[in-house]
Image (cartoon, rainbow, N blue to C red):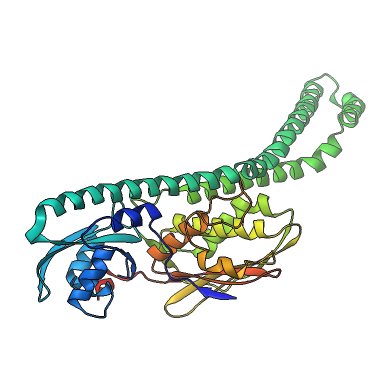
Amino acid sequence: MNSTHAPPALWSEDALWAASTIDFPILFLDKSRTVHAANPAARALAQRIAPGGGPEALVALVSDEGWATALRQGDWQGVVQVDAAPALSLEIHFGHARDSAHCVMVVVDISERGERKRQYEELQRTVDRLASTQEQLLQSEKMASIGQLAAGVAHEINNPIGYVGSNLATLQDYATALLTLMEKYHEALFSEDPAGQREELLQARQRLDIDYIAGDLPNLLKESREGIERVTKIVQDLKDFSRVGRDQKMQPADLLQGLDSTLNIVWNDLKYKVRLEKHYTSLPPVECLASEINQVFLNLLLNAGQAIEQRGTIALASGCDEREVWISITDSGCGIPPEAMPHLFDPFFTTKPIGRGTGLGLAISYGIVAKHHGRIEVTSKVGQGSTFRVVLPIHQPRTGATAA
């Protein structure tokens, strides 16, 4: 079963219910001006302006310049006049986060500003509270992911640290033996009969097992260095993954390196039951927030692993054309039931048992990819597995192009 998902319900039922109780038009949109929901007042006004049309008629009243300003600044306000409504105040708000994937549009008849302004301000406070709650939920989900990985990451770090510690203890014994032999050589060298000490030195060398130390010492040093490099790599991957992107600008990034870095973090949760296949095609640098895209990879890799009950395969692949790149994660797990596909990216929807998922992982992933002007495509068959394909533009559209 294939599915390329339209944007999910990004606003909670509480927000939609609050909007339905207000008697002036409220619309919920995304960055592409797609209407997700509109209250009865908005639909009624749209019918007055364009009989037979939908709430999109109200969105059409916002000029391209106004929409570009809203995208750039996070909000916009303007006044328009149409035959069916003498003077309408149009307002676009993206909430707390300027890069939020969704916004609210309010239409106010400015000839009746008194009570309506109070109602609007009340609704805006409700929207702000809901937006703040949503940000807290997203942060909680990220912390839950880190918490879920903590034991595995600790194991991945403790394992090399353990044998490095053991090697250091052995190296300490080797150093003691070598220093002891050096001291005997020093004593023999400055004795009255250095040649007469030869037999004693050979016995000391044999007793201290110097020949074995000489053969084992390089391997211990090499193994210890590899262990430290392994820990350093895991720590660097964690830093790359947890980097906060709020104040960062999108920059060209190597997606395959980010995928491998994220895989390095999550591998302890997968390696005991997953056979990994990589079918990479080289990709150009992609303009993005790398830490956020890595979180998408993390969520999809965890889901792929949880879909496999005992033993299975996860295949990673990549490709590109002149405008877009894609990375797919395919598992041989249980698959997704057809009735669940339309709700796959809805917040709090999950097919996992209680305690194994919050239902926010895919919703967060969808929001991140949508913010990058990309999409997630899903193919799944029950009992055979699923493929999640993340498609991203190589270059982000500029503000002017987005407005156009």
Determine which quarter of the picture holds residue 198: top right
Q: Position of residue 357 (x, y in %)?
A: 58, 50
Q: Nearer the viewer, residue 167 or 176?
A: 167
Determine which quarter of the picture holds residue 292: bottom left
Residue 177 visible, this orientation: yes
Judge from the rendering whether residue 174 lies leftward or rightward of residue 348; answer left or right: right
Residue 193 versus residue 393 in the image, above or below: above
Q: Nearer the viewer, residue 65 or 357?
A: 357
Q: Position of residue 136 (x, y in %)?
A: 41, 45
- Image point (76%, 45%), residue name: 219
Q: Nearer the viewer, residue 85 or 312?
A: 85
Q: Position of residue 329 (x, y in %)?
A: 60, 66
Q: How many marks?
A: 0
Quarter of the image for the C terminus: give it. Answer: bottom left
Determine which quarter of the picture holds residue 21: bottom left
Judge from the rendering whether residue 351 lies leftward or rightward of residue 55; answer left or right: right
Q: Nearer the viewer, residue 362 or 403?
A: 362
Residue 98 visible, this orientation: no
Residue 320 versus residue 207 in the image, above or below: below
Q: Position of residue 197 (x, y in %)?
A: 88, 24
- Image point (38%, 61%), residue name: 251
Judge from the rendering whether residue 26 lies leftward or rightward of residue 360; answer left or right: left
Judge from the rendering whether residue 157 lies leftward or rightward of residue 320; answer left or right: right
- Image point (30%, 58%), residue name: 20
Quarter of the image for the N terminus: give it. Answer: bottom right
- Image point (41%, 58%), residue name: 289
